[in-house]
Amino acid sequence: MPDVTALFWDVGGVILSNGWDRAAREEAAKKFGLDWEELQDRHELASPAFETGKITLDTYLERIVFYRKRAFTRQEFTDFMFAQSQEFPESRAVLSSVAAAGKYLLATINNEPLELNERRIRQFQLRREFKAFFSSCFVGIRKPDEGIYKIALEVTQRQPEECLFIDDRELNLECAQQLRMRTIHFQDAAQLRRDLAANGVKVAETESGG
């Protein structure tokens, strides 16, 4: 088995909170007085195009919320969406420690719509560790479709066996494994650190979050 040379990371649920998940949508329904079932049904229909960059945030919001007049503004709703993102300091510190080793290519493989993805990259300074972003909105394919993993491997010119993929969802890991990538099922920062070490990935003992 060759040494690991590249690590691909999921973002939402690993480094950051999920940006616009079911819980966030439920909170939005409560805050803005929306019918939850209707909001969820409309989201399910609009989400595939939204996450693969085929429709903009404005179009998505038009389809799920602003198809009729509301007592709140589009800006108020958008601000609420963006405010749901939080950093997970402990796992971010592990990521920073891996980056500090200077031995590995670090990139993301994640499902996110364009406007949210670009905002989170800026807000949380993800370019500090990651050199490439294989986001569904950029490549037009979502996990668990094997195409998104293949693009990441082809663009980075890596063999699957030298790549390690970290995600909090098992289905996404299974598809990576079928391509012979190594995987870690993320649960918490301490477990991540142990599993990285088990795969021979150097993680500095002293870490600094941020």
Image (cartoon, helix red, strand yellow):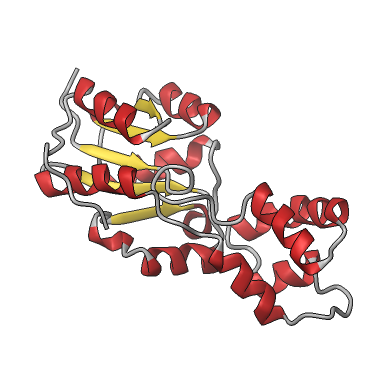
Up-down relation of residue 62 to residue 166 (above or below): below
| Image point (61%, 56%), residue name | 20
| Image point (55%, 56%), residue name | 19
Up-down relation of residue 163 to residue 112 (above or below): above
Q: Position of residue 192 (x, y in %)?
A: 31, 31
Q: Position of residue 137 (x, y in %)?
A: 52, 58
Up-down relation of residue 126 to residue 153 (above or below): below
| Image point (30%, 30%), residue name | 190
Please state if 68 lies on the left or on the right of 12 as rendered. Answer: right
Please state if 35 lies on the left or on the right of 101 as rendered. Answer: right
Q: Position of residue 13 (x, y in %)?
A: 48, 43
Relative depth, front residue between 159 and 18: 18
Which quarter of the rendering shows the C terminus?
bottom left
Which quarter of the rendering shows the N terminus?
top left
Up-down relation of residue 82 to residue 190 (above or below): below
Relative depth, front residue between 51 and 87: 87
Relative depth, front residue between 117 and 71: 71
| Image point (19%, 42%), residue name | 98
Q: Quadrant of residue 166?
A: top left
